Amino acid sequence: MKKPKSRNRLLGLLFFAVLSTVFIFDQSCRSQSEGREAKSPANQTAIGETRAPATQTAGGQSSVLVTTDLNLDFSKHKVTFIELGADRCIPCREMQPILKEIAQEYAGTVQVVFYDVWKDPRPARQYGIQLIPTQVFIDQGGKEIFRHVGYFAKEEILNMFKEKGLL
Protein backbone atom coordinates (compact mmCIF):
# COMPACT_ATOMS: atom_id res chain seq x y z
CA MET A 1 0.00 0.00 0.00
CA LYS A 2 1.39 3.40 -1.02
CA LYS A 3 1.76 6.25 1.46
CA PRO A 4 0.02 9.46 0.49
CA LYS A 5 2.28 11.96 -1.28
CA SER A 6 1.24 14.75 1.10
CA ARG A 7 2.50 12.75 4.09
CA ASN A 8 5.89 12.22 2.46
CA ARG A 9 6.11 15.91 1.60
CA LEU A 10 5.23 16.85 5.16
CA LEU A 11 7.92 14.55 6.57
CA GLY A 12 10.45 15.97 4.08
CA LEU A 13 9.60 19.54 5.06
CA LEU A 14 9.80 18.67 8.76
CA PHE A 15 13.21 17.06 8.28
CA PHE A 16 14.45 20.10 6.33
CA ALA A 17 13.17 22.49 9.02
CA VAL A 18 14.92 20.58 11.82
CA LEU A 19 18.15 20.34 9.84
CA SER A 20 18.07 24.07 9.02
CA THR A 21 17.44 24.97 12.65
CA VAL A 22 20.37 22.87 13.83
CA PHE A 23 22.66 24.43 11.20
CA ILE A 24 21.59 28.00 12.08
CA PHE A 25 22.00 27.34 15.82
CA ASP A 26 25.48 25.85 15.25
CA GLN A 27 26.57 28.85 13.16
CA SER A 28 25.19 31.24 15.80
CA CYS A 29 27.08 29.44 18.59
CA ARG A 30 30.29 29.47 16.57
CA SER A 31 30.08 33.21 15.93
CA GLN A 32 29.36 33.93 19.60
CA SER A 33 32.28 31.79 20.78
CA GLU A 34 34.64 33.35 18.23
CA GLY A 35 33.67 36.80 19.51
CA ARG A 36 34.33 35.83 23.14
CA GLU A 37 37.51 33.99 22.22
CA ALA A 38 38.98 37.04 20.53
CA LYS A 39 38.38 39.13 23.68
CA SER A 40 40.21 36.79 26.05
CA PRO A 41 43.95 37.42 26.32
CA ALA A 42 45.85 34.48 24.84
CA ASN A 43 42.72 32.33 25.32
CA GLN A 44 43.40 32.02 29.05
CA THR A 45 41.36 33.37 31.94
CA ALA A 46 40.44 32.04 35.34
CA ILE A 47 36.80 31.01 35.76
CA GLY A 48 34.83 33.89 37.22
CA GLU A 49 37.78 36.28 36.96
CA THR A 50 38.97 38.79 34.38
CA ARG A 51 42.65 38.87 35.31
CA ALA A 52 45.50 37.08 33.57
CA PRO A 53 45.64 33.31 34.15
CA ALA A 54 47.67 31.94 37.00
CA THR A 55 47.78 28.93 39.21
CA GLN A 56 47.97 31.20 42.26
CA THR A 57 46.09 34.45 42.89
CA ALA A 58 47.70 37.37 44.66
CA GLY A 59 46.05 36.32 47.92
CA GLY A 60 47.63 32.87 47.75
CA GLN A 61 44.41 31.11 46.80
CA SER A 62 44.55 28.81 43.81
CA SER A 63 42.36 29.46 40.81
CA VAL A 64 41.10 27.27 38.00
CA LEU A 65 43.34 27.54 34.97
CA VAL A 66 41.34 27.96 31.78
CA THR A 67 43.67 27.30 28.89
CA THR A 68 44.19 26.01 25.38
CA ASP A 69 47.73 24.84 26.21
CA LEU A 70 47.96 21.06 25.88
CA ASN A 71 51.45 20.84 27.41
CA LEU A 72 50.69 20.83 31.13
CA ASP A 73 53.29 20.21 33.83
CA PHE A 74 51.82 17.42 35.98
CA SER A 75 54.88 17.05 38.22
CA LYS A 76 54.15 20.05 40.46
CA HIS A 77 50.91 18.66 41.95
CA LYS A 78 49.87 15.32 43.41
CA VAL A 79 46.98 15.24 40.93
CA THR A 80 45.79 17.34 38.00
CA PHE A 81 42.02 17.57 37.71
CA ILE A 82 41.12 18.33 34.08
CA GLU A 83 37.57 19.38 33.23
CA LEU A 84 36.71 19.14 29.53
CA GLY A 85 33.54 21.06 28.85
CA ALA A 86 32.19 24.32 27.47
CA ASP A 87 31.24 27.63 29.00
CA ARG A 88 27.74 27.40 27.46
CA CYS A 89 27.06 23.81 28.60
CA ILE A 90 24.68 23.75 31.59
CA PRO A 91 26.19 20.73 33.43
CA CYS A 92 29.63 22.26 32.77
CA ARG A 93 28.48 25.53 34.34
CA GLU A 94 27.23 23.58 37.35
CA MET A 95 30.73 22.12 37.72
CA GLN A 96 32.47 25.53 37.80
CA PRO A 97 31.86 26.31 41.51
CA ILE A 98 33.12 22.81 42.38
CA LEU A 99 36.26 23.36 40.32
CA LYS A 100 36.92 26.67 42.06
CA GLU A 101 36.34 25.21 45.54
CA ILE A 102 38.67 22.26 44.96
CA ALA A 103 41.33 24.56 43.46
CA GLN A 104 41.15 26.83 46.51
CA GLU A 105 40.85 24.17 49.21
CA TYR A 106 43.56 21.89 47.82
CA ALA A 107 46.01 24.44 46.38
CA GLY A 108 49.44 22.89 46.02
CA THR A 109 48.02 19.35 45.99
CA VAL A 110 45.47 19.55 43.17
CA GLN A 111 45.91 21.53 39.96
CA VAL A 112 42.52 22.26 38.36
CA VAL A 113 42.43 22.91 34.61
CA PHE A 114 39.44 23.70 32.37
CA TYR A 115 39.40 23.22 28.59
CA ASP A 116 36.51 24.67 26.57
CA VAL A 117 36.26 22.03 23.86
CA TRP A 118 33.68 23.99 21.87
CA LYS A 119 36.18 26.81 21.42
CA ASP A 120 39.13 24.50 20.81
CA PRO A 121 38.46 20.80 20.03
CA ARG A 122 42.13 19.73 20.33
CA PRO A 123 41.85 18.78 24.05
CA ALA A 124 38.76 16.66 23.26
CA ARG A 125 40.78 14.74 20.69
CA GLN A 126 43.84 14.47 22.93
CA TYR A 127 41.84 13.04 25.84
CA GLY A 128 39.47 11.02 23.63
CA ILE A 129 36.23 12.41 25.03
CA GLN A 130 32.81 11.95 23.48
CA LEU A 131 30.54 13.77 25.93
CA ILE A 132 30.88 16.85 28.11
CA PRO A 133 31.52 17.48 30.85
CA THR A 134 34.25 14.88 31.24
CA GLN A 135 36.68 14.94 34.16
CA VAL A 136 40.12 13.37 33.75
CA PHE A 137 42.48 12.96 36.70
CA ILE A 138 46.22 12.70 36.01
CA ASP A 139 48.96 11.78 38.53
CA GLN A 140 52.37 13.45 38.87
CA GLY A 141 53.87 11.10 36.32
CA GLY A 142 51.31 12.08 33.66
CA LYS A 143 49.32 8.83 33.95
CA GLU A 144 45.51 8.94 33.88
CA ILE A 145 44.21 7.55 37.16
CA PHE A 146 40.46 8.16 36.86
CA ARG A 147 37.85 9.43 34.41
CA HIS A 148 34.23 10.46 34.87
CA VAL A 149 31.58 11.67 32.42
CA GLY A 150 28.80 14.07 33.43
CA TYR A 151 28.19 16.17 36.51
CA PHE A 152 30.55 15.04 39.30
CA ALA A 153 29.56 16.15 42.81
CA LYS A 154 32.30 17.56 45.03
CA GLU A 155 31.74 14.89 47.70
CA GLU A 156 32.15 12.14 45.10
CA ILE A 157 35.36 13.73 43.79
CA LEU A 158 36.77 13.96 47.32
CA ASN A 159 35.79 10.34 48.01
CA MET A 160 37.59 9.26 44.83
CA PHE A 161 40.68 11.25 45.92
CA LYS A 162 40.65 9.44 49.28
CA GLU A 163 40.12 6.00 47.70
CA LYS A 164 43.09 6.63 45.39
CA GLY A 165 45.23 7.89 48.29
CA LEU A 166 45.51 11.38 46.86
CA LEU A 167 44.30 13.23 49.99
Image (cartoon, grey):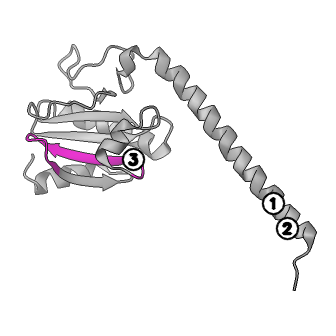
Q: Residue at x 29, y 19 (%)?
A: 53
Mark 2 against mark 3, which lies toward the viewer?
2
Q: Are marks 1 and 2 in contact (CB under 8 Å)?
A: yes
Residue 117 x/y as whole percent: 41, 38
Mark 3 against mark 1, which lies toward the viewer?
1
Q: Residue at x 35, y 48 (%)?
A: 134
Residue 2 x/y as whole percent: 88, 81
Q: Mark 1 — residue?
A: 12
Q: CA distance from mark 2 to mark 3?
A: 39 Å
Q: Mark 3 — residue?
A: 133
Quarter of image, res 24:
top right
Q: Mark 2 — residue?
A: 8
Residue 49 x/y as whole percent: 37, 20
Q: Earlier in the sequence, mark 3 or mark 1?
A: 1
Q: Residue at x 23, y 18 (%)?
A: 57
At label 1, the amino acid type is Gly
Q: Residue at x 13, y 47 (%)?
A: 143
Q: Is residue 140 magenta?
A: yes
Q: Which element is circle 3 on? A: loop
Q: Residues within 10 Å of mark 1 (few under 14, many from 20)?
A: few
Question: Magenta span covers which residues?
Answer: 130-144
